[in-house]
Amino acid sequence: MNVNTNYQNISDSYLFSTIAKKVNEFAENNPDKKIIRLGIGDVTLPLCKAVVEALKNASSEMGVKETFHGYGPEQGYEFLKSKVQAYYEDNGVNLDSDEIFISDGAKSDLGNILDLFAVDNTVMVPDPVYPVYVDTNTMAGRKIVYIDANADNNFLPLPEKSVKADIIYLCSPNNPTGAVYNKEQLKVWVDYANENHSVILFDAAYECFVTDENLPRSIYEIEGAKTCAIEFCSLSKMAGFTGTRCGYTVVPKGIEDGLLNKMWLRRQTTKFNGVPYIIQRGAEAVFTPVGQKEIQENLNYYKENAKLISEVLKKHNIWHIGGTHSPYIWLKCPDNMSSWEFFDYLLNNVQIVGTPGSGFGKNGEGYFRLTSFGSRENTLEAVKRLDDFLK
Ligand SMILES: *Cc1c(COP(=O)(O)O)cnc(C)c1O
């Protein structure tokens, strides 16, 4: 056999292992110092009550002959798909049920969708970026072109007429920067994609953090998107499903006269046997009025954390974006420090751990990501330390 040599081209990510190593070293040498982690990209609040109740009930059903469920539909049970459909409808977006595919999360689908596209397609990725887009395409051997997200464009790059690509990744609200495209900006992307016969892979994993009604939570709020965009969504950040696993992907029938929708159904029915019944019942509960109210409380908790961090940065004149419609705060390292210099500076002086922006791409150098996924207590303590130290 011959191995897929494309794997040799994936760059090793030392980001999180280097962070862990530095933090462990510091902890060993300073056992009396309490370290606060604001680098985490995982939620910390538990599943809401409505979800837990639904999971329990569904588990019980599985133990009774009459209500037991074996293989389900690969694309998801109708009871959940109709909830997702209604969720979009509330947002003014009408989707057919067979355009919605339930999955075990956005990350797998973002990788799996590439089955549908030829290897000789060129891929466009904004830098800095969620590493999954780059690595999955490198594994497949596709050519990647980068577009610059930087302070000049508020980390919201728009297409350059001279740069052509077949597959375009957009993530809004963005990880790592927290930046959110407005409708006019997304319209530019949609028009560009339709003109160039490109497909947009729109990662909406953080849509639930958008509260400004004028900002789009789905790319389908933009006219023309249903002929060029696939949208990926997840209950991970929305409802704390990072360990429970459930998401959904929308493949509109308007792209290529329904070809991509058909191919994705074929792909899923061939390679995927669906999300567990129990989990889909838990996911269903997220979309009930009680579930929505409960997850909103959790989202508000994170948002309040973000606000506290943002306020202290503002007070000390540290340039930053994000935090308003995102759990991420993206700041410019003060005194022209590099991302890693600032990492060490914070760890050594105030024992706060964040994520160096350079780990997300070359344009991340000199920037730093803090997250609001910590506890309120730790966030308040971190804010106080920053306030005292930055004086
Ligand atoms: C967390 C995250 C996801 C969600 O991934 P899941 O596999 O659904 O947990 C997707 N995209 C981005 C950018 C993320 O940060």
Image: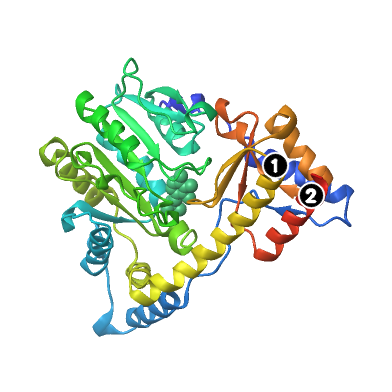
- The residue lying toward the viewer, choosing from 244 and 389, is 389
Tell me if I can see residue 15 in this picture: yes
What distance separates the C-alpha of mark 2 from that of mark 1?
13 Å
Rendering coords of residue 133 (x, y %): 43, 35
Residue located 41% across and 59% down the image: 235
- The residue lying toward the viewer, choosing from 19 and 326, is 326
* Image height of 277 relative to 381, above or below: below
Crowding at mark 2 (Cα within 10 Å: few <14, some 14-19, many 20+): many
Comparing labels 2 and 1, the label whose residue is closer to the camera? 2
Could you tell me which secondary element the residue under label 2 belongs to? loop
Rendering coords of residue 381 (x, y %): 75, 59
Q: Which residue type does callout 1 highlight?
A: Ile
* Image height of 18 relative to 234, above or below: above
Residue placed farthest to the top in the image?
A: 162
Specify whether 174 is left or right of 228: right
> In which image quadrant can residue 33 be found?
bottom right
> In which image quadrant can residue 296 be found?
bottom left
* Image height of 46 relative to 386, above or below: below
Q: Which mark is residue 19?
A: 1
- The residue lying toward the viewer, choosing from 300 and 51, is 300
Residue located 51% across and 67% down the image: 298
Specify whether 256 is left or right of 324: left
Q: Quadrant of the C terminus?
A: top right
Q: Which residue type does callout 2 highlight?
A: Gln
Tell me if I can see residue 25 in this picture: no
Q: Which residue is mark 2?
A: 351
